[in-house]
Image (spheres, rainbow, N blue to C red):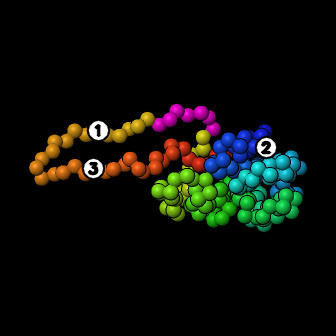
């Protein structure tokens, strides 16, 4: 189903980053390569240019050496480069192997965001407790748009204070959605 979803996104919603998550179990770690099912999936979705392929650690024995071998073998089979792969849910999920570091988030924002005047994540936004990813929200169902919760204060104007008026007519409006989608 991933190929059809990626095709739909490419045709209809081009400004969303696309991540593919694949479970890595003890079987993949022992064989030091992804299963045939995942290799077939990779070859079918590569033409739709996902931004990142994440190996979700569901094993009890994944270490740096076996992870690098799995990634290297996947690269040989698909023609992708190693920087397209990362590791999720693992002690290895730090640095460049993390799903969504601040550096990767800024890179993706430069590719997919239509707004230029928005704050970008920094290393301060990275969790660092369980992995090296920035804090993010995975949306896996339809959600309501957030309500506008501007505070309305009634203050009296005195002779010494002036109300600052800002012209916002020509400013671009920020989008309410994040440009990241995770396939789980």
Residue 90 locus on image (x, y percent):
68, 56
Q: At 78% across and 64% down in the image, what residue appears? A: 81
Q: Position of residue 74 (x, y in %)?
A: 83, 59
Which quadrant: the N terminus? top right
Going from N to C along the chain, the mark reached first, 1 or 3, is: 1
> Which element carries disc 2, helix, strand or loop?
helix
Q: Is residue 68 magenta?
A: no
**Residue at the farthest left position:** 159
Marks 1 and 3, Cα distance to the nearest angstrom?
A: 16 Å
Residue 142 shows in the view = yes
Disc 3 marks which residue? Answer: 165
Please indicate, yes or no, whether residue 132 appears anywhere in the rendered image. Answer: no
Which residue range is magenta in the image?
140-146
Q: Is residue 22 left or right of residue 112?
A: right
Q: Nearer the viewer, residue 11 or 104?
A: 11
Separation of marks 2 and 1 at Cα, in angstroms: 47 Å
Give the Cα separation between the discs numbered 2 and 3: 50 Å
Helix, strand or loop at label 1? It is loop
Q: Nearer the viewer, mark 2 or mark 3?
A: 3
Q: Residue at x 50, y 57 (%)?
A: 116
Q: Which label belongs to residue 3?
A: 2
Residue labelled with disc 1: 152
In front here: 18 or 137? 18
Q: Is residue 106 above or below residue 21?
A: below
Relative placement, left or right, of 109 versus 43 is left
Q: Residue at x 66, y 64 (%)?
A: 96
Mark 3, secondary structure of its residue: loop
């Amino acid at each position: 189903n991933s190929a059809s979803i990626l095709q739909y996104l490419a045709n209809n919603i081009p400004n969303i980053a696309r991540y593919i998550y694949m479970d890595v179990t003890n079987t993949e770690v022992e064989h030091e390569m992804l299963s045939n099912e995942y290799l077939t999936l990779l070859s079918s979705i590569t033409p739709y240019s996902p931004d990142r392929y994440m190996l979700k650690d569901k094993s009890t024995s994944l270490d740096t050496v076996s992870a690098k071998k799995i990634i290297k073998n996947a690269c040989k089979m698909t023609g992708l480069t190693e920087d397209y792969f990362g590791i999720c849910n693992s002690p290895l999920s730090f640095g460049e192997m993390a799903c969504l570091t601040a550096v990767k988030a800024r890179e993706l924002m430069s590719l997919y965001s239509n707004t230029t005047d928005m704050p970008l994540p920094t290393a301060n936004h990275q969790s660092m407790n369980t992995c090296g990813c920035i804090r993010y929200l995975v949306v896996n169902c339809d959600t309501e748009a957030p309500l506008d919760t501007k505070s309305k204060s009634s203050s009296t104007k005195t002779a010494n204070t002036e109300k600052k008026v800002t012209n916002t007519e020509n400013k671009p409006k920020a989008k309410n959605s994040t440009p990241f989608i995770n396939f789980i």
